[in-house]
Amino acid sequence: MGKNSYRVLSINPGSTSTKIGVFDNDTCVFKVNIEHSVEDLKKFKEISDQREFRLDTVLKVLKENDIDIKTIDAFSGRGGSLECCEGGTYLINDLMYQDAKSMRIVKHPSALGIVIAFELGKKYKKPSFCVNPPDVDEFNIEARITGIPGVYRESRIHALNQKEIAIRYAKKIKKKYEDLNLIVVHAGGGISVACHNHGRMIDCNDIVNGDGPMALNRSGFIPAKPLVNMCFSKDYTEQQIKSLINKNGGIVAHLGTSDVREITKMIENGNQKAKIIYDAMIYQIAKQIGAMYVALKCNCSAIILTGGIANDKYYLKKLNKYIAKLTKVVVMPGEFELEALAAGAIRVLTDKEKSKIYTGKPVFKGL
């Protein structure tokens, strides 16, 4: 491989799987989604305890597919459980590693991406990176304020795919991401609708804390008083309420499925409830797009629809009726997280982007 050619291993741990990809610059030479059984994961008391198991599994899969770990020039991990930070590609340092390893902020397997990438980098004396972790926070101050002092809106976004899609679109039209105003709609299990103002995501719905549109398995915005009544009714535990907000709420709570293919089939078969619920979700996404359009002062180059649901024709047709007159609508379905992890690392390795240093100091601490 030449001076400007690099091989990167991308590592993206999820709740029940670990996705890995090997990229020679922007060419994917190997990609796999390693499924972990419930029985295997039950052996570990804490998510952080899965580190060695997942690392060994990754190494085993690479070996089985004749990929020599020593040919890897850099490791790039998904990330998470960090203090809120700016977007960009971070060279993983000891502080980032320790925050991710401890999972003191958020307990989620994605944090193991940092841990595994850092440990592999240290062992093989190669750089390790984290690209646009879930903790990216570029909100304007106005976007943070709520009607209760001390309670602030937080930036919880599909930051990795949001940024990658925006960068890819900019490249496609031969412009720089930093020169555009965009709205990106990532619609999957969770839905994030973010406005990108010259390279910064200045506002978005919080996909973790119950904000924005209802999603396949998340409640989205819920009126405060009825939710308070539920909390104090003694009919629900704290965990059950939280689960309704970001795990078992939304479409799945109404229809018993979070599979869009099943939902559209139900609608085709005349199920009126399914139509009402799915249409309501699309309506709420459209309203969120409208809010982001205003946040950009109605100056938006394009609305980009991405994520798994962007493959659904019913969703696209219905949503387009609401937003078509705002600006250009672009459909880029799927997610490109492994590609984004590699691309960020390669931009730094080829001096197209300067790596950022994680300080552990949140970008916003309150007023």
Image (spheres, rainbow, N blue to C red):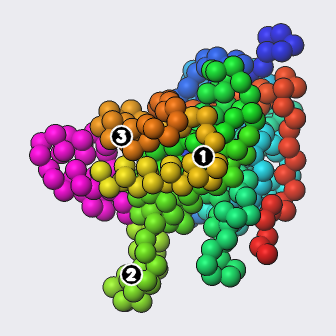
Residue 185 pos. (x, y %): 51, 43
In the picture, residue 169 is in which quadrant? Answer: top right
Check disc 3: other Cα within 10 Å, few if <14, some if 14-19, many if 20+: few
- Percent coordinates x, y for residue 317 in the rendering: 33, 36
Q: Earlier in the sequence, mark 2 or mark 3?
A: 2
State the separation of the CA atoms marked 2 and 3: 31 Å
Q: Residues within 10 Å of mark 2 (few under 14, many from 20)?
A: few
Residue type at the position of mark 1: Cys
User: Picture quarter containing residue 151?
Assistant: bottom right
In the picture, the disc for residue 226 is: 2
Along the line of sight, the residue nearer the viewer: 88 or 143: 143
Left or right placement of residue 249 versus residue 104 in this view: left
| The magenta stretch spans residue 206 | no
Report if the CB atoms under discs 1 and 2 are less than 8 Å apart.
no
Residue type beneath disc 3: Lys
Q: Which residue type does callout 2 highlight?
A: Pro
Quarter of the N terminus within the rendering: top right
Q: In this view, does 315 lie to the left or right of 33?
A: left
At a point 70% along the width and 44% down the height, the residue shown is 197
Q: What stretch is highlighted in magenta?
A: 249-277
Label 2: which secondary element: helix
* Residue at point 63%, 67% (across, down): 153
**Label drawn at residue 40:** none
Q: Name the residue under label 3.
A: 321
Q: Is label 1 or label 2 in front?
A: 1
